[in-house]
Amino acid sequence: MLYDNIEIKDGRLIFAGADAAKLAEKYGTPLYLMDEERIRQSCRAYSEALGGCLCPGSKAIYASKACCFGKIYKIIAEEGLGADVVSAGEIYTAKKAGFPMEEAYFQGNNKTDADISFAMDCGVGYFVCDNFEELDAVDAIAGQRGIKQKILLRVTPGIDPHTYDEVATGKVDSKFGVAIETGQALEAVKAALSKKNLDFRGIHCHVGSMVFDSDVFIRSAAVMTGFMSDIKKILGADTKILDLGGGYGVKYYEGQGEIDIPANIRLVAKYVAERCSSLGIAVPALRLEPGRSIVADAGITLYTVGSVKKITGYKNYVSVDGGMTDNPRYALYGSRYTVLTANKPEPAETIEADLVGRCCESGDIIQPGVRFPTDIKRGDLVAVLTTGAYNYSMASNYNRIPRPPVVTVSAGRDSLAVRRETLDDLTGCDIF
Ligand SMILES: *Cc1c(COP(=O)(O)O)cnc(C)c1O
C-alpha cells in the first residue's frame, strides 16, 4: 500500500485504524478523512530535525493554506509549530482556535490595508513583506498603533525548483517577492531598515512546491546566505531569521520519487551554518514552512459511485458524488492520485475508466485511466488517497454543491472537525 496508515482487510479499506465504509455510512459521502496521528508525526519529524540542527532557534511553520480548519490550528499549536496565514479568513480561523498569534507569519503578495490592520489587531507576530508598497503600508499602520512590527522580507533567489510552472515561485520573474539579482531586494531591506515602525528580522523565500530534488534547498540557501552577507557588509544589519519556505514533495502514487525530509533538513542546516561562518556572518535561526508534507498523506476522500458508463469501443467512466468541487487538483495541474475501491476485495479482473465528478464540466475529472473491479457499480465506495493537502482548502461551491465534512481519525476513533455544508449555508449570503 502507498502508506502504512491504509490497508485492505477482508475486502474493506481500513484508514488510520477505522473502517472507511462505516465512516461513509455515518457521515455520508463525499467525505474527507484526516489521520490526526499522521499529522502529528509529520509535525514532530520537522521539529526533531530542526530542533537538533546546527542553526539554533530553528522551527517549522505550518503553511495553513494546504488545509485550513479550526481543529488543525489546535493540533499545530500542540505540536509547537508556527503557522503561515495568507488572509483575514485564515487569521480569523487561527485566532478563534486559540492559536498563539505571535507565532503566526502573514504571507501573500497583496495584503490590503484592511488585512494589515486586522492582522495587527489579532496580534500576528510576523509580517512577511512582499514589496515596497507593503513596507510603506505596514510601517504606516504600525505607526498609527504605536507598535514596532516584526517583519521578514520575501525575496526571489532566482532558483528553478524543477517542478510544475504553476507552483514554481522562486524565479526572478515571479509575482512573489523582490528579486535579489536585480538589486531590488537589497533596496527593499534598506527601505525596511529605515522605517521607524518596522523591526527587520530576516529574509524569506519559497521556491516552489512538490520538490523532490534534495539540491533545491541547498541552492536557495546558497543564494540567500550570500544575500545575508551583502546585507551585513553594505547595510550593517544582521539577518536573524532565514526562512526557506515550504515545498517538500509528497508521494501520490507508486513509483513516484521520494525525499527523506529530516535528512535533507539536517543537510541544509549544516550547509547554512558552515557557509555563514565562512562568510563571517551570524548563523540565523531557520524557518521552514511545510504545508503539503504535513497534511497530504494524512488525508483520503471517500465517494459513492453513481453511474458506470461503458461507451462501447471508446472509453469508460465511473461517476461519483463529488468532483472538482472537492478536489480541483487534476483539473488545475493534471495531478496524479492513487484510487482504490474501498468496499471490495482486490479484484481478479479490472476495467480502465476515468474517475469523474458530478459537475457540469467535461474537465471535471478526478483521475483518468483508473483500474476498477470489472463489476464496479452504483453504490460502491471509492477512495482517493493523499488528498489531505490542497483539496478541502481549494474546494468550491461550483454548481452550488455543498462542501463535504472533514472527519479526523485518531487511533481508530472518528471525530467531526468540519460539518457538511447545508443548503442554507449555500444560500446564507443571498438576498432574496
Ligand atoms: C504554499 C506555500 C508554502 C507551502 O508549500 P508546500 O508545498 O505545501 O509545502 C510555504 N510557504 C509559502 C510562502 C507558500 O506560499
Image: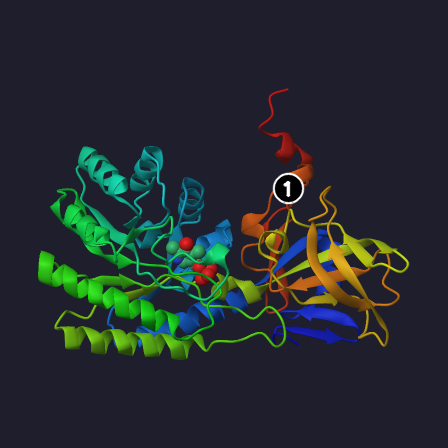
Residue at 21% x, 54% y: name it. 183
User: Does any atom of ligand 1 lie closer than 8 Å to the CB of label 1?
Assistant: no
Q: Is residue 401 above or below residue 339?
A: above
Residue 430 location, quadrant = top right
Residue at 26% x, 52% y: name it. 153
The residue singled out by tag 1 in the image is 421
On screen, residue 197 versus residue 46, left or right, reads left
| Quarter occupied by the C terminus | top right
346 or 91: nearer the eye?
346
Percent position of residue 10, x then y:
79, 76
188 or 104: nearer the eye?
188
On screen, residue 299 versus residue 229, left or right, reads right
Residue at 15% x, 69% y: name it. 282
- Please name the amino acid that badge 1 sits on: Glu
| Quarter occupied by the N terminus | bottom right
Q: How many marks?
A: 1
On screen, residue 373 versus residue 396, left or right, reads right
